[in-house]
Amino acid sequence: MTAIAVFVGSIRKQSINQRLARAVEALAGKRFEFSYVDIGGLPHYNEDLWSDPPESVQTLKRTIEASDGVLFVTPEYNRSIPGILKNAIDWGSRPTGKSSWIGKPSAIMGASPGAVGTAVAQSHLRNTLLVLDVVLMGQPEAYLQLKPDAIADDLTIADDHLRILLERQLDAFEAWIGRVRRWHG
Ligand code: FNR
């Protein structure tokens, strides 16, 4: 099974992005095994902590490094990504020379109740991931305008268009991971 490290940029209980990630996991079935990274448990980035790295940081790095691919599911905060997600990405990028991100096949999706559908946040995220040598899937993009009830409590998706879009995203990501593997031998 393909191991996916999942970063969700919202830690609130009723998060539509948390729900979206769980729905995508359910759609993926046995193809992918999702490991959710606890970004809320990380300290604020502080170079001093590398002398005795917190367990949460070690777990984050281990989860990225053990994964076949990384999926980001993020809201947009003030036309960028939430600080809590940036903090997690920064932890994964250090210590110098020991970034966990290099060469990782990755994909982004994000949901907002607003019409922008996280497009600006995703654009910022792409910039950051590019610098880290993450191997980011360019297409298809997933800018989702979701009302809170778009995904039911049992994770069923009533809207056929949304379900088909997410299935295509999963198919493309699986193919992307395979392609990156072949490139890197
Ligand atoms: C928002 N929201 C928001 N939405 C958007 O489309 N573009 C934006 O720039 C912002 N900015 C923003 C800033 C802050 C601080 C908050 C708390 C919210 C609204 C946001 O999309 C909405 O609250 C989502 O429901 C947040 O995602 P989760 O927590 O439901 O996953």
Image (cartoon, helix red, strand yellow):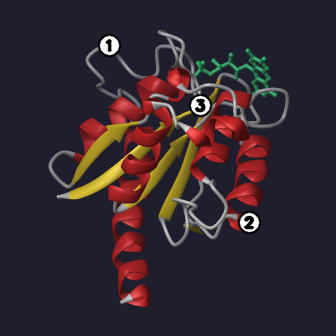
Q: Position of residue 88 (x, y in %)?
A: 60, 38
Q: On the picture, is 145 further left or further right than 150?
A: right
Assign the N terminus to one quadrant of the image: bottom left
Tell me which label, 3 or 1, sits earlier in the chain: 3
Q: Position of residue 6 (x, y in %)?
A: 43, 42
Residue holding disc 2:
131
Label 2 CB sits under 8 Å from any ligand 1 atom: no
Q: Residues within 10 Å of mark 3 (few under 14, many from 20)?
A: many
Task: Report the Cα–Cα distance between label 1 and label 2.
Answer: 37 Å
For marks 3 and 1, give the one nearer the viewer. Answer: 3
Q: Residues within 10 Å of mark 2 (few under 14, many from 20)?
A: few
Q: For mark 3, give the secondary structure.
A: loop
Q: Which quadrant of the figure has residue 110? A: top right
Query: In the picture shown, does residue 74 fall above or below 90?
Result: above
Label 3 CB sits under 8 Å from any ligand 1 atom: yes
Query: In the picture shown, does residue 126 fall above or below 133?
Result: above
Residue type at numbered disc 1: Asp
Residue holding disc 3:
9
Q: Position of residue 15 (x, y in %)?
A: 52, 17
Q: Residues within 10 Å of mark 1 (few under 14, many from 20)?
A: few
Tell me which label, 1 or 2, sits earlier in the chain: 2
Q: Residue at x 38, y 41 (%)?
A: 163
Residue type at numbered disc 2: Val
Q: For mark 1, give the secondary structure.
A: loop
Task: Report the Cα–Cα distance between label 3 and label 2.
Answer: 19 Å
Q: On the picture, is 96 further left or further right than 156?
A: right
Q: On the picture, is 82 further left or further right than 184?
A: right
Name the disc covering residue 153, or none: 1
User: Residue 125: in sight, yes or no?
Assistant: yes
User: Residue 143: in sight, yes or no?
Assistant: no
